[in-house]
Amino acid sequence: MTRSLDGKVAAVTGAARGIGDAIATRLLADGATVFALDKNPPDEPRAGIVHIETDVTDPASVAAAFKTIDERAGHIDILVNNAGIQRVGLVGKVSFADFSAVVATHLNGLFLCASEAVPRMVARGKGGSIVSIASTAAFVGLPGRGAYCAAKAGILGLTRALSLEVATSGIRVNAVAPGFTRTKFIDQGLADGSLEEGWMIGRVPMKRLATTEEISNAVRFLAGDEATYMTGQTIVVDGGWIVQGIPEAPTWLQTPAS
């Protein structure tokens, strides 16, 4: 680690576990002061990371979290929008409540957190970096995951638009799109039968799942000064998966012909 983030203050949503935990840990290792915004307590508390109970779908909760960051650190330099949930179901069967919950967590959460971070970054006048966790699901269709695909594609659209809005303020806005990564999301899919490990690995040219550290490395790059001329971009970290796509899906995730 380079300690090149010394003096930087970072907020990472959904940092209680998985990719978010790996991102928060990586930013801390490089010297940043890190706040983990999550409505759940961390699976494994990390020394030096401040946990703030936050519901990213609730404007008041997000505003309170950033007020706490103001009080504890005085400014914000890096925002990583990682919070996300999954609900699996076919259109016509999945409930509106489940669809809305997925979109609210992924996409509304990005909007609400950026709405708090951007004015603070602009007022400070020292730029900043916003990195959002999208997915390969933003580029390809995944049967049974319409809400997830829509929300992740929305993240890419908002990333591009926001990057143009804040470019003259020195704020960079980018995204990372992970492929299949060993997390509780994947474990959930394996448990409910919507994913099979052999099926996943067979469709990844590198023939393995990503580690959370491999995703956090890409986030760290975009968050730091190594990427000072990059904005509005998405780095895909998927072992080559979306280059070849998914040839078929499990039968139960396909609507019958009649």
Image (cartoon, helix red, strand yellow):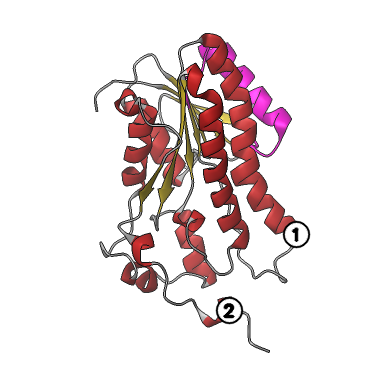
Q: Nearer the viewer, residue 67 or 254?
A: 254
From the viewer's perspective, is 226 left or right of 80? Answer: left
Q: Nearer the viewer, residue 193 or 136?
A: 136
Residue 41 shows up from this direction: no
- For label 1, the SS is helix
Residue 127: x percent and y percent?
Answer: 46, 17
From the viewer's perspective, is 178 left or right of 56? Answer: left
- For label 2, the SS is loop
Residue 95: x percent and y percent?
Answer: 74, 63
Q: Quadrant of the N terminus?
A: top left
Mark 2 Cα shell of 10 Å, populated few (<14), some (14-19), many (≥20): few
Q: The residue under label 2 is which amino acid type?
A: Gln
Residue 131: x percent and y percent?
Answer: 46, 34
Tell me the residue at 35%/55% (across/down): 238
Q: Nearer the viewer, residue 21 or 206?
A: 206
* Residue numbers of the magenta segment: 53-78
Q: First in sequence: mark 1 or mark 2?
A: 1
Is 126 above or below relative to 113? above
Q: Quadrant of the C terminus?
A: bottom right
Q: Image quarter for residue 148? A: bottom right
Is 72 above or below relative to 194? above
**Residue sticking out furthest to the bottom:** 258
**Residue tagged 1:** 96
**Residue tagged 2:** 254
Tell me the residue at 42%/33% (across/down): 24
Magenta-span inclusion, residue 69: yes
Q: CA distance from mark 1 to mark 2?
A: 19 Å
